Image: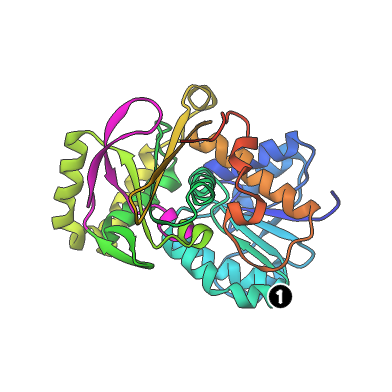
Amino acid sequence: MDKTWMIYGANGYTGELIAREAVRRGLRPVLAGRSRDRIEPLARELGLDVRAFALDDPEQIAGALQGITLVLHCAGPFSATSAPMIEGCLRAKAHYLDITGEISVFEHAQQQHERARKAGVVLCPGVGFDVIPTDCVAAALKAALPDATRLSLGFDSRSGFSPGTAKTSVEGLAQGGKVRRDGAIVTVPLAYEVRKIDFGDGEKLAMTIPWGDVSTAYHSTGIANIEVFIPGSPAMIKNARRANHFRWLLGMGFVQNLIKKRIEKTVKGPDAAARDQLPTFVWGEAINAAGTRKTARIKTANGYSLTVTGSLAVVEHLLSETVDGGAYTPSKLVGADLVTRLPGSGPLVVS
């Protein structure tokens, strides 16, 4: 592959993991970020080129992307960084991938579909754990039950948080829960619905969360009613519901800044040994108007390892295949079997 591509945010926890694995595979991404001082040590170690630029001005971003075929964007919070990078990619005619799970990012990318189509640019956010496994489960359930009217998805993960994921979660608490109802994304209380689910490792109490599939699964399947669940202890569910009363406080800028600064000092992503010992169980359920029900399950590698291998699988796909421009979800871009082809994944079983 002689096409030049870029990892932006390579100095972050996940960006660095992806850069190291890319080099191990013989790939030569350009490493980029806001600060050359933060990027250069890793680039020197890996023998890679460096570019440093901020995400304040789309014209400057487009200029910094000259000669770049594809950007894998790993610098969050994506609610702030994705739109300018997408704009820069559209102007520079570079494909855009990211590892977000944020609903607003997915919806913004879909709104750029026509511009991307005309520019011949692929926009595909969510090429990590957010949302490859659940998106592939959604697509498999749609194939198994084409007239489904309701889709529930979820996962049981014990990977812990990286600093970036923790910061994004803090932002999400302030915005409340999200579900899709009759095709529209609506705001609901945190832990809006609670039920028992067997994600693949025994039945557990679970609650709804504002996960990216509330956006992406609709674009992948057309199913109009979507919820996403994770396991939660009674205490965790109680605390989530209690937080509904304090969302106004969590949404204040100075409170967000205080919490995020605390995260920077205290949160570290899981190390390789922890990642290797922490699989993830992914589940989905589709129901049609007649009450027919289909269930899907798959066991995968932990979220961070899957983000590394999943994002690079999509990078390699785009570098080697000719794809029409437009906004995509992972299953629409690479295929609903993508998750089963990643290291650590078992079969995707629909029953």
Residue 51 vs 228, above or below: the answer is: below
- Dot 1 alpha-carbon crowd within 10 angstroms: few under 14, some 14 to 19, many 20 or more: some
Residue 284 vs 79, above or below: the answer is: above
**Is 207 in the magenta?**
yes
Nearest the viewer among 205 and 68 is: 205
Q: Could one spot residue 139 in this view of the protein?
A: yes
Q: Position of residue 276 (x, y in %)?
A: 53, 24
Give the magenta-colored segment's residue range. Answer: 189-216
Q: Position of residue 155 (x, y in %)?
A: 40, 38
Q: For the residue labelled by badge 1, is the local secondary structure a helix, a strand or a loop?
A: helix
Q: Position of residue 163 (x, y in %)?
A: 43, 43
Does residue 165 appear to the left or right of 209 in the view shown?
A: right
Residue 173 vs 48, above or below: the answer is: below
Residue 321 vs 13, above or below: the answer is: below
Q: Residue at x 39, y 38 (%)?
A: 267
- Amino acid of disc 1: Ala
Does residue 2 appear to the left or right of 265 in the view shown?
A: right
Q: Mark 1 — residue? A: 119
Nearest the viewer among 127 and 323 is: 323
Nearest the viewer among 229 and 262 is: 229
Residue furthest to the right in view is 2
Q: Residue at x 71, y 40 (%)?
A: 22
Q: Could one spot residue 61 in this view of the protein?
A: no
